[in-house]
Image (tube, helix red, strand yellow):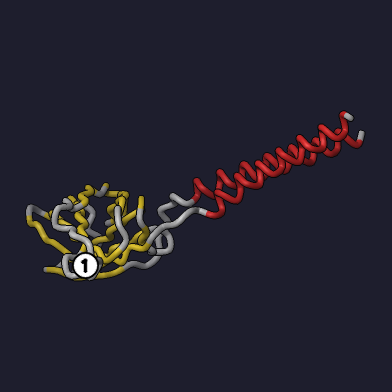
């Protein structure tokens, strides 16, 4: 009876740790973004937003540009592309002249929101240019972004370590009870 209770508790713990880690990792891609950086150019107001917390990190980032006209009416019929390149004036000590800009086409989501993903290769100051084509007229809006190192995802790593520890404990208990 005692063995069944211990096995059930350990199995429940393994499932809980595994599923919570997977759910947390999946939830990180949610496009529910906060407030971003706003710029205005020739009758278009553009807001650039990154990720949930608007922090830009090396690796994949969710990106969204929201467009309005001067009357605060949503612009829903635009073709939006962004290009990003490291700021040539930054003191990174790297020769970035040989690198091509990162280019991404954004998809029209709804309510004047254009979304996509961008992968920053290096940390430092980047210049993001939104190329907006509206009614046959192209308008470019420039934004600055400070990209920081993403580092490891400690929650996901911790979940996997927890699962491994539980498996080791189960094996030790099982070995001890079989003697």
Furthest-left residue in this view: 136
Q: In screen coordinates, is 30 left or right of 139?
A: right
Furthest-top residue in this view: 178
Residue 14 image point, x, y percent: 69, 40
* 18 or 98, nearer to the observer: 98
Which quadrant is home to the N terminus? Answer: top right
Residue 32 image point, x, y percent: 42, 57
Q: In the displayed structure, would residue 115 be above or below residue 70?
A: above
Q: Is residue 23 visible?
A: yes
Q: Residue at x 62, y 42 (%)?
A: 18
Q: In screen coordinates, is 19 left or right of 150?
A: right
* 124 or 55, nearer to the observer: 124
Q: Residue at x 82, y 37 (%)?
A: 173
Q: Pointer 1: what residue?
A: 45
Residue 163 image point, x, y percent: 66, 42
Which quadrant is home to the C terminus? Answer: top right
* 87 or 66, nearer to the observer: 87
Q: In screen coordinates, is 179 left or right of 93?
A: right
């Amino acid at each position: 009876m005692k063995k069944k209770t211990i096995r059930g508790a350990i199995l429940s713990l393994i499932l809980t740790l595994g599923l919570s880690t997977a759910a947390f990792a999946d939830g990180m891609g949610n496009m529910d973004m906060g407030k971003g950086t706003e710029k205005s150019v020739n009758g278009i107001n553009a807001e650039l937003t990154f990720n949930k917390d608007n922090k830009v990190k090396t690796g994949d980032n969710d990106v969204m540009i929201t467009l309005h006209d001067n009357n605060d009416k949503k612009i829903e019929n635009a073709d939006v592309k962004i290009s990003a390149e490291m700021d040539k004036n930054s003191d990174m000590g790297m020769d970035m002249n040989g690198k091509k800009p990162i280019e991404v086409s954004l998809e029209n989501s709804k309510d004047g929101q254009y979304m996509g993903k961008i992968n920053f290769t290096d940390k430092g100051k980047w210049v993001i240019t939104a190329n907006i084509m509206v009614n046959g007229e192209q308008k470019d809006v420039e934004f600055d972004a400070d990209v920081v190192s993403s580092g490891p995802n400690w929650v996901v790593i911790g979940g996997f370590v927890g699962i491994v520890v539980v498996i080791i404990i189960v094996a030790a208990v099982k070995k001890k009870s079989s003697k």
